[in-house]
Image (cartoon, helix red, strand yellow):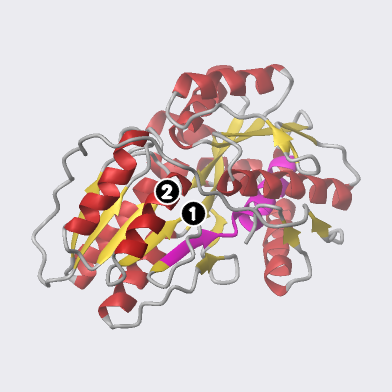
Amino acid sequence: MNKLPRIALGLGLAGVLIGLAACQQAPQPVETPEATTDYCARMVTNSGGLDDRSFNQSTWEGLQQAEKTLGIEATALVSTNETDLSPNVQQAVESGCQMVVTVGWELAEATATEAAANPDTHFVIVDEVVDAPNVKPLVFQTAEASYLAGYLAAGVSKTGIVATFGGDAQPPVTLFMDGFVGGVAAYNAAHGTDVRALGWNAETQQGSFTGDYEDVSKGKTLAQGFIDQGADVILPVAAQVGEGAAAAALDNGNVMIIWVDNDGFETLPSEYRSIVLTSVLKNTGTAIQDIVSDDLAGQFTSDAFIGTLKNQGVDIAPYHDQAVAVSEELGAEIDQLRQDIISGAVLVESPSAL
């Protein structure tokens, strides 16, 4: 294969703590099977809900697996809007459970507040960093895996145009987008091509966003706009809203999507399987199980878990039904690129990275 370049996507660091709205009565928790130990964990979703086909769902699946393998009790408190967030974290703490797991940047402020007030409770926050001795951040260098996905998208595109969009301009979102356009640039440099990536400019950190993570119609409209410009591979980073992009791809034909967080071939409705090229994976479930196991063994620390290609915390999913679209040569290039990122021969950087 052609030599792959070193590409730096930007400089600096980013983190977000957002103030939340006033409280209202929290929804009823999701019940789970009877535990075999006195250890319990409470998870609080962000406003995307439990079955978001994204990080809430993956985190919950990890806790459910911990129930089966470790004998703990796990319950999810589902946030349906922003006013549920703070009271749900408070309710989780008041349950007396040893661990509280919160998901997403929307819960950062509530997590920090409750952690300070309850130093004996251990917290895990997914996709955000809260600096406290009893809070363990669980974050992922998704730019590394998205870089592979961008290279793949450029390699399979028939039109020479691909696209990405996000739910909003938060670091865990733009990290995916930075990696994706970087991978497209790497493919162009290696092959002398000029594949265009719509929807995100890594240099200016400006791009296309739907403004939420629940309104599927917004994702369909935005994706259709990209398709009208010629895009035939689209990476939505917008949880449930991304399903709208899948619907647009299916309606138009000859368009593929790349899912995020978990394997969209498995988690999206079955009618979309034929248009899922791959997915940018975060191995949230396994990380959650490991953290619970460490806590049970008295080995909890506030050191951040950072998922990378090297520790298999991130990767891309199998190509499934689209394997025929990926040539043997392109597949080999991506395998080599993965190893080059792991070894440090190729550097993937982003303003949104830790």
- The tag on residue 245 is none
Q: Are marks 2 and 1 in contact (CB under 8 Å)?
A: yes
Mark 2 or 1 closer to N-term?
2
Residue at horizontal 26 percent and vertical 46 percent from the top: 88
Q: Among all residues in the image, which is located at the extreme right?
A: 192
Neighbour tally class for label 1: few under 14, some 14-19, many 20 plus, Cα within 10 Å: many
Q: CA distance from mark 2 to mark 1?
A: 8 Å
**Displayed quadrant of residue 215:** top left
Q: State whether residue 86 appears in this view.
A: yes
* Other-residue count near label 2 (Cα within 10 Å), few / some / many at <14 / 14–19 / ≥20: many
The residue identified by callout 2 is 55
Between 100 and 193, the one lying in front of the other is 100
135 and 312: which one is in front? 135
Front tag of 2 and 1: 1
In which quadrant will I find the N terminus? Answer: bottom right
The residue lying toward the viewer, choosing from 223 and 19, is: 19
Picture coordinates of residue 114 (x, y %)? 33, 58
**Magenta residues, as a range?**
136-154
* Residue drawn at point x = 28 percent, y = 65 percent: 118
Question: Is 138 covered by the magenta stretch?
Answer: yes
Where is residue 151? Give x, y as percent. 72, 48
Q: Quadrant of residue 196?
A: top right
Where disc 2 sits, the SS reads helix
The residue identified by callout 1 is 127
What's the residue at 41%, 77% (across, down)? 301
- Point out residue 143 in the picture as x, y percentages from the top left corner: 65, 54
Predominant SS along the magenta part:
helix
State whether residue 4 is above or below residue 151.
below
Query: 247 left or right of 205?
Result: left
